[in-house]
Image (cartoon, rainbow, N blue to C red):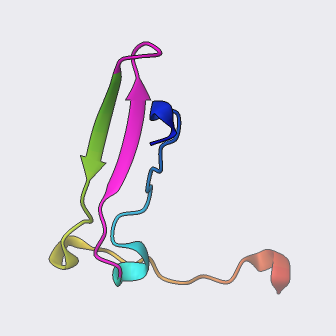
Amino acid sequence: MFEDKLVTVWSAPNYCYRCGNVAAILSFQTPKERVTKIFVAVPETDRVIPPQNTTPYFL
């Protein structure tokens, strides 16, 4: 399809912590040689949510 000229790449694994998808990066070594790197989300037990801080600019 599309003569190998169209690619969809997802860059956010488990988007919003509810989609369950993997992420991918497509790396081109040459115009015809490409390498797909696939990433999964961090396990929920290892996830760290940073505290929400109000920027002093808005105070």
Q: Is residue 19 above or below residue 10?
A: below
Name which residue lies at 45% across and 33% down.
4
Q: Nearer the viewer, residue 4 or 46?
A: 4
Q: Is residue 57 above or below residue 27?
A: below
Q: Nearer the viewer, residue 45 or 34?
A: 34
Name which residue lies at 83% across and 75% down.
57
Q: Is residue 23 magenta?
A: yes
Quadrant assignment, res 13: bottom left
Quadrant assignment, res 11: bottom left
Name which residue lies at 47% across and 43% down.
7
Q: Quadrant of the N terminus?
A: top left
Magenta: main secondary structure: loop
Q: Is residue 44 magenta?
A: no
Name which residue lies at 27% across and 65% down.
41
Residue 42 in picture, x, y percent from top left: 24, 66
In the image: residue 6, left or right of residue 54? left
Q: Is residue 24 above or below residue 13?
A: above
Quadrant assignment, res 54: bottom right
Q: Magenta span covers which residues?
A: 19-33
Residue 37 in picture, x, y percent from top left: 29, 40
Residue 5 in picture, x, y percent from top left: 52, 33
In the image: residue 27, left or right of residue 39? right
